[in-house]
Amino acid sequence: MKALVLEGKDIPLQIKTIADPLLKAGKIQIRIKAAALNHRDLWITKGQYAGIQYPLVLGSDGAGIVERVGASVSAEWTGRAVLINPSFHWGDDEEAQGKDFKILGLPDNGTLAELINVPLEYVHPMPSHLTFAQAAALPLAGLTAYRALFKRARTKAGDRVLVTGIGGGVAQFALQFAQKTGCEVWVTSGSEAKIRGAVGMGAKGGANYKTEGWAKQLKESAGNFDVIIDGAGGAGFADLTDLAANGGRIVIYGGTRGNLEKVSPQRIFWKQLSILGSTMGSPSDFHNMLRFVNEHEIVPVIDEVFPFSEATQAFAKMEAETQVGKLVVEI
């Protein structure tokens, strides 16, 4: 089969012919039709994760057609359109992942290949209202957004929600999910165009965090926020504690802007704030996320779809941070 292979840190990705994966009992072989990128994939190419073993096929998100099934798996799966839950071996505790937890695409080979073998428990029927490209864009970012909003922040109808960095996939899903729940949603971005795009999707408004005094201006426009979903961290996080309402919940799912700086513990305890971490999600989170997507017929926002031969261009666009929504590779 053909696959996009990483052979070492900072070595350009190449499409190569490698051996088909050996199908074992309890697994399903999927012919991938589309795979979506995540920042995780980009950071792996730069060696920014522990335990990388080369060569490696990247990709956590994928959708396709079941080609074959291993022993003990019903043949009824053959030919079905499916997507993959990339959150492997979560464990028995709904509150946090266990010691065996891992994400598809590291250390195991991922979805940027023609074929992949996945344990049956991580394979789900593809939502019927989505294309393969749209379905591929859903799993990792959709799961992360769903758990952050509903399991960790306990978001409910009527909450005022702030989503930071609205260009990213998780942020896009957080906006869609919160809006469908009946929340008033505001956003931040370093791009006025991305803010306008979010307003076009139903956001109430937004603020450009590159503008002097942005947090004060946002507070004057919107008031305080019951829920804040943040994937950036960094120096701007202190502003989020000021923007949070008394009893507010701030969920951190990423740290693209680095360590937290100048965060006042006095502000946190006096306002009774909850600072919550969130990573991926449990099998029940994934099931509930899919049910929510099906019920509301949510369609992932896709910035661009690339042919497999141009997959490296998708990585270049992600590094440039110009996208709004997901970057997808058709295989």
Image (cartoon, helix red, strand yellow):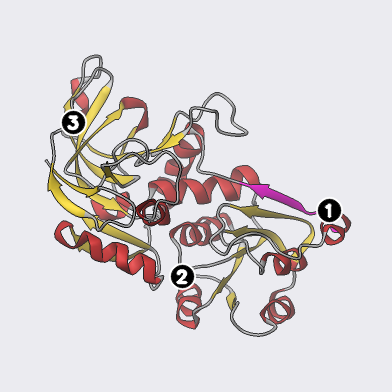
For marks 3 and 1, the one nearer the N-term is: 3
Examine the rendered structure and indicate whether residue 105 appears above or below residue 123: below
Q: Tell me if I can see residue 153 in this picture.
A: no
Examine the rendered structure and indicate whether residue 39 appears above or below residue 193: above
Name the residue that disc number 2 marks: 201
Q: Nearer the viewer, residue 198 or 229?
A: 229
Q: Position of residue 196 (x, y in %)?
A: 48, 79
Name the residue that disc number 3 marks: 21
Q: Measure how far apart labels 2 and 1 are at the Cα level.
A: 32 Å
- 10 Å crowding of disc 3: few (<14), some (14-19), many (20+): few
As shown in the figure, which amino acid type bears the numbered disc 1? Gln
Question: Under tag 2, what secondary structure?
Answer: loop
Magenta-colored stretch includes residue 275: yes
Image-based side of 46 in relation to 57, left or right: right
Q: Measure how far apart labels 3 and 2 are at the Cα level.
A: 41 Å
Question: Under tag 3, what secondary structure?
Answer: loop
Name the residue that disc number 1 marks: 272
Examine the rendered structure and indicate whether residue 224 appears above or below residue 170: below
Query: Is disc 3 in contact with disc 1, using a CB cutoff of under 8 Å?
Result: no
Front: mark 2 or 1: 1
